[in-house]
Amino acid sequence: MNIYPLNSTQEDMLRESNMETMENGFLVTVKYELPEKIMTADEVAASCQKVLDTNHYTHVHLIRQDDGQLMISESTDMPNNVWRYKMTYKEWEARKSEFSRPFKLLEEPGVRLSVIETEHKTVICYSFCHIFFDGISIKLVCSSIDNAINGVPIEDQGDMAAIWNREEIASYGSDAYQLAKQIACEKFKGHKYTDICRQTDNPWGKTLRTFYLLDYNRMKHIRLNAGTLTEEQQQNMMTTICVAAYALALGQMAGTTDVVFMTTNHGRIDKRLRGNVMGCFLKSLSLRIDVNPEQSVAELIGQTRAVLFGTMRTLIYPWLHQMRDLQVPLEDQVGTEMNVSGANIYEYAHIYGVDYPSCHIEMPQSEQHLFLVVQMREEGLTFNVEGSDALYTQEQLETMARLSAEYALQLIGDQRKKLKDILIPG
């Protein structure tokens, strides 16, 4: 299997590691709980192990070269086995945060699969190191396990991640790269990311999390009027609206009309995102949006759509290079962030015709700056916000979730209204 360099996004995530212990806290941990009558814990564990044995990328890890350079390896020389536990369900509930712990990048593969046997349920717990896995590839691992359980053949993807990393690195310095660099640097020179955090000398703290549900019943007008739109078009429209709503809420809470924050884009070559390929292809991108209250709703939405499409022109120019070329100090490189996620990203396990919803398990400690994810679920849009309590209060995060959701609803309404006429008390 291939040994290959990290792409720019992976290098950026690696900077947040403890370089002495090589531990990294960029991870996602989710769980599925299956009734014992569906499958025994042994059968579930065997299906999980089959996935690990079949797909080489589930063994992905870092190695250190003789010259000290860190490289990615997909070699199965690093074993990856399902972890087995047996405990009461009450004990599982008390201990589940232990399963969301940093990855030791030189000592273990970038995905952990654990099967926990309790008296009534079998729990599948996945942890993914974000250096190697993005939302789409997380879904792929989950789908592979679903397939193994349901008797569907599993395929090894080969070395696609290695090929795409090399292609990205080879593009640095190209004409397209230089043009994207010029556009990005002109737009963001001299600007810091907008934030609402409290001043602190220690960003590590307890993980705070909240969410606000925007029920579809309150959005019937858009869903009824969207009958001529495809599901993809409707989701793209809601993405634009939710990004604009977040910008409006962030600007209000930060007391500014010139808002700069981050988002991510799946940088895979194929527009369908190649859902059968594992690997980290998330691109961190900067957005700058004017939320001047004198503009109309239509103007804000149009501006946001243009900004989002404009990021595609700079996709070839990595965020880490932007920070370097703009000479942004390390302490100013932490940005507030928002993303819109489809309902199909690590949301459900599909087993024997039944959908079992996933649940995130958060790390107990965090240094996360303001991070909002909008998820499209059956019941509506959920505005999920998290951050470290060393940086934010619970009230701040709850306000951000509420304002973002309510502004999304307002932006669906009368497009002629001025933003100042739809402002909501903080």
Image: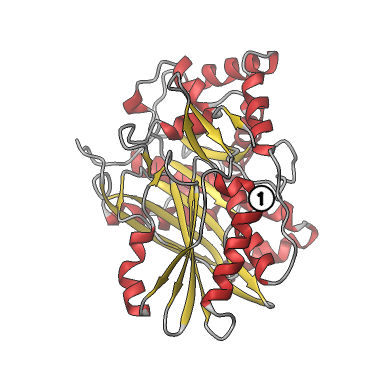
- The answer to whether 121 appears left or right of 353 in the picture is left
Q: Which secondary structure, mark 1? A: helix
Q: Which residue is mark 1?
A: 237
User: Image quadrant of residue 166?
Assistant: top right
- Expressed as whole percent of the image width and height from the top left, the position of residue 132 reads 54, 42
Work out whether residue 415 can be spotted: no
- At 65% from the left and 15% from the top, the residue drawn is 179
Which sits in the foreground, 281 or 152? 152
- The answer to whether 220 appears left or right of 92 in the picture is right
Which sits in the foreground, 117 or 374? 117
- Expressed as whole percent of the image width and height from the top left, the position of residue 419 reads 49, 45
Q: Give the residue at the far left of this rendering.
A: 201
Amino acid on which disc 1 is placed: Met
Q: Is residue 215 above or below residue 293?
A: below
Q: Is residue 215 above or below residue 251?
A: below
Which sits in the foreground, 67 or 32? 67
- Expressed as whole percent of the image width and height from the top left, the position of residue 19 reads 34, 32
Which quadrant is the N terminus positioned in? top right
- Expressed as whole percent of the image width and height from the top left, the position of residue 298 reads 62, 43
- At 62% from the left and 55% from the top, the residue drawn is 53
Q: Is residue 44 above or below residue 319?
A: below
Work out whether residue 88 can be spotted: yes
User: Image quadrant of residue 220?
Assistant: bottom right
- At 69% from the left and 65% from the top, the residue drawn is 147
